Amino acid sequence: MKRIAWLALVAAALVALRDPVWAGRVSSGFRSWEEDPPGTPFRWTAGRASFFVPADATAMTLPLRTEFSGPNGAPTEVEIRSDDRYLATVRLPDRHVWTRTRLPLGGRAGRRYRRIDVRVNRVVPPFMLGVMVGEVELTR
């Protein structure tokens, strides 16, 4: 009987880790929230950052902005993925301008949340700043 109870506990723990209820509050690769002069909230990324959105979202609008030009004025490129599935590469040629990109997320993911990965093609030392990410808008 103890073995069955132990196996049930392990199975419940694995299910909880596969689809944790707290995942929606988790992010990584971001600095703290700030506000630009007009009062728009944003967070700086490092070279890579991740956050979670509810799985029932069918699309998201992701505001992105850069403050730094690349070598010879090259645009900053940001690759966006959802659960390791490529969504888009967004080019940010203009500094100080918010680019709002609407990205379809597809059908339900089979979990409570989807992981969104943001990968920036370069960072600026010494703080290793990537791009500014504003508040994400979701469509359900």
Image (spheres, grey):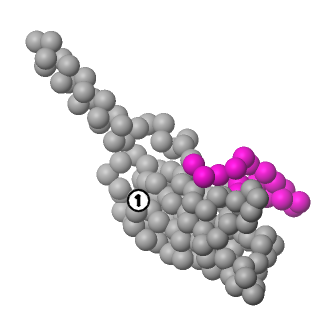
- For numbered disc 1, what is the local secondary structure? loop
Residue at x-position 35% and y-position 48%: 111
The reply, left or right, for residue 131 in relation to residue 48 is right
Nearer to the camera, 12 or 123: 123
Image quadrant in which you'd find residue 17: top left
* Amino acid residing under circle 1: Asp
Residue at x-position 72% and y-position 46%: 32
Q: Horizontal and vertical percent for residue 117?
A: 51, 60
- Residue at the far right in the pictured view: 37
Q: Horizontal and vertical percent for residue 26?
A: 54, 43
Q: Quadrant of the N terminus?
A: top left
**Highlighted range, magenta:** 28-44
Q: Residues within 10 Å of mark 1 (few under 14, many from 20)?
A: some
Image quadrant in which you'd find residue 137: bottom right
**Residue 52 position (above or below residue 73):** above
The reply, left or right, for residue 12 in relation to residue 125 is left
- Residue at the far front in the pictured view: 126
Residue at x-position 39% and y-position 67%: 85
* Magenta highlight on residue 40: yes
**Residue corresponding to mark 1:** 83
Nearer to the camera, 13 or 70: 70
Q: In this orientation, does residue 69 appear?
A: yes
**Residue 19 position (above or below residue 79):** above
